[in-house]
Structures are given as C-alpha cells and as structure tokens.
Image (tube, rainbow, N blue to C red):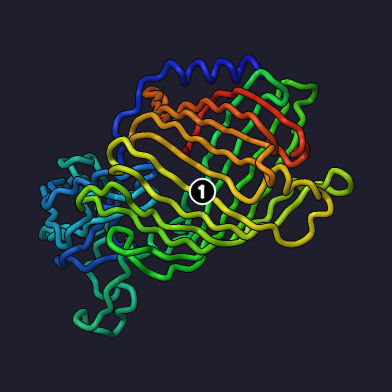
Amino acid sequence: MKTLVTCLIIALAGACPLPAQKLVVSLLAPAQPVAAGSPVPLDLLAVNPSPSNAAFEAAPVLHGVLFAGTRSWPVELQASLPGPAAVEPGKFGYRRYTLALPTGATGRLVLEITDGEYAPLRAVLSVATDVAQLPGTNATPLSTLDTATPALAQAQRSFLGHFSPHEPMYFIYGSKVPGAKFQFSFKYRVLDFGGDASTTARRSLQFGYTQRSLWDIAGNSSPFYDTSYMPSFFYESQALQPADGPARPVTWLGYQAGYQHESNGKDGLASRSLNTLFFRPGVILKPLDDWHVIIAPRLWMFVGDLSNNPKLKDYRGYGEWLVAVGKNGGAALAYTGHAGREFNHFTTQLDLTIPLRIKPLDFATYFLVQYYDGYGESLRDYDQKRSSLRAGFSLVR
C-alpha cells in the first residue's frame, strides 16, 4: 500500500500544469412535451466546480441540427435572456435561448448544437401534435395553459444545488507514523436570506461538516490512528468584489459566525470532545484575479464541559490565523497557526498547492505539500508536539 501511494504522488508530480478552469456546461430542455410549432425555451446551464471565477462565453446565437429518425433540420437558437459574464466558484449561471420548431418536427427529437464555445451539446425534446397529449390540457385551450416549469428552475430547487465546498479536501502521505492524513468537508445551505454576491452581501444559514483522519496505512491491518468529526451550524455573509468593478487594494470577503462541535467518536478515557462558538472574517489584499493575499483569522470561545480534555485550552488557545498567498489558476501557499492560551505552544501548518491535470484521465486537482509542526493535529494527543511532512493531492484548497 505504501508503494501504491508513493507511485500516485510521483504521477501527480509529473503531470502538466492545469490551464484555466473550464465550466461544466449542459443544454437543458423542458421536461414536459411542448406543442408542435410553438417556440421552445432551452437553458444553457454552466456549473463552476473550480475554486476561482470562470468566464461564461455564451454566444447570442447558437446553430445546430434537429433529428427525428432519418429526418433532420438545421435550426438556430436565439438568446432571449442575457447570461452572466462569469460564474463564481461553486455556483452556476445560465443563458435562456428560444428554438423555433420547424414544420413537421414532432415526436421525440434530438437537438445537437454544432457551434459555439461549448459544442457539441445535446438535448432531447418531446413535441406533441395533439392538445390532449400535453400535461393538464384535457379540456383547456392552449392560450390558458400554465407555462411548464423550466428545467433551470428544477435545478435551482434541487438538493445538490445547496451543497458547496467548506474547508480544504485532500489526501496526503508521509514517512512518519501515522503516514496518511485526509480530510473532506462540505457545507449545505439550509436557509437563504437573499443578496447578490456580485453587488451586495449574500446571507445564508449553513450546515457544515468536516472530517479529518490520521491513518497508519502502512501498519499492521492499517488502523486509523485518530479521526475528528466536526459538524457546525453558522451564519454566513459573503461579499465578493464584482468581476467588472475597479481594482481595490483591500476587499472585504465577509464572515462566518456560529457553533461547532468536535469529537473523536470515542468513549471512556479515549474520549475527546469540545464545543465552540466562533467568528471568522476574511479580507483580500490586491485584486483576486492577480497575485493576492487572503487573511482570514478565526476566533472562538469554549462552551460546555471540557472535563475529558481539561488542558486543551492551554494548547489550542482562543483563535488561529490563516494567511494565504497565491493567484487564481496558479500556485498558492497558505499558513495556518495558533499559539495556545499562554502563547507558549506554537503550531504551524504550511500548505503549498499547485494546480495539476492528468489529461488521459481527465483528472484535474492540486498537488499538495503540507508541513505540520505543533500541537493538536489529532484530538487523541492534543498535548504532544508532532512534526510531519506529507504530500499528495487536494480537491479543494
């Protein structure tokens, strides 16, 4: 297993640099049948899974071919609504188009877009010739029918549309025991209080979950050394600099404030747990699309019982600072540290991330090198100093 992990790290290190992040683009057609001869609304939906803004180059006119068995028609899609110039990280944007159905195009049709930045794209349409075949039209004239719910509206209400990245997600490995360390994290938007991240603060109530494990992957039976489970509820106010606005020397990112529980899931003498109320603001120095510095300190206060780890305050203290230097689409170096309650238990974590792509596998990620020196890498031995150097890959930095 150790050899396998080493080979994976070498393969990632030899991959070529990742170019500008591309969007995941789909052409969405109405889910219900449409009437023959009527204009058909279609949405060009772009999802941005990358950690930086991505340009959305949706042309005002798209050309394609409509297929019905052995028959085909050249068609043109006209944009009816403007789309955004860029899509923010973890968000999606769309542009609405209208298709005029050719005469005789009925039944189950396949639309293929043949030009534009995101071609080829395909969608399936169902065209009804009989009014009775349309949903909810048994005795109702076409002029009084309610418009079918657009596919985009369904995507906006979907369960997956509320998920987004939270803390970094990675898998790394080093020579010291326990060798492997990995973390995954997400947040789910429970309530949305409105706002537009391009002009005003977007405010929401979020449920967050982070899990970090230390894994003795090379040991006998490959046991897990320790795992920290960190659910949280927090209020988030997110305000990004508009993409087309003037460059600012300092940009306010927003803040998070809420509650977090952390435990290692053990009982008895091995049990470790704590509860905190936290506040985390963030600012950017220099424009986000150029070399910039992100400063995001995190302050907390302990609440509830700490009897199973009474000295944890001495080692963890009441806050940590995060400073990251980097460029979108380029390398970044992040420093995270805390000093303990009496400023005598210093902890440092350095994360160097480099964008990578393995073209044959269509695998885009970050090569990560992490150096850790200090206390509290695991709750199990929060009062013991540990140093380690690990490398691997990171899906979210």
Q: Residue at 29% of width from left, 53% of height from top?
A: 241
The residue where tag 1 is placed is: 297
Give the percent coordinates (x, y) of residue 379: 74, 42
- Towards the viewer: 288 or 44: 288
Q: Relative to 109, is 325 on the left or the right?
A: right
Q: Is residue 103 left or right of residue 136?
A: left
**Tag count:** 1
Disc 1 residue type (three-letter): Pro
Q: Residue furthest right?
A: 268
The residue lying at 31 percent from left, 64 percent from top is: 200
Is residue 362 among the parts visible in the rendering? no
User: Closest to the observer: 97 or 320?
Assistant: 320
Going 35% across and 30% down the picture, which residue do you hit?
A: 330
- Tell me: residue 60, above or below residue 138: above
Task: Point out residue 328 in the picture as x, y percentages from the top left corner.
Answer: 33, 37
Q: Quadrant of residue 172 in the image?
A: top right
Residue occupying image coordinates x 58% and y 16%: 6
* Residue 394 relative to residue 294: left or right: right
* Rendering coords of residue 256 (x, y %): 50, 58
Residue 125 in the image, given as x and y percentages of width and height: 27, 57
Secondary structure of residue under mark 1 = loop
Q: Nearer the viewer, residue 86 or 40?
A: 86
- In the rendered structure, the answer to whether residue 362 lies left or right of residue 188 reads left
User: Which quadrant does the N terminus fall into?
Assistant: top right
Q: Is residue 180 visible?
A: yes
Closer-to-camera residue (75/377): 377
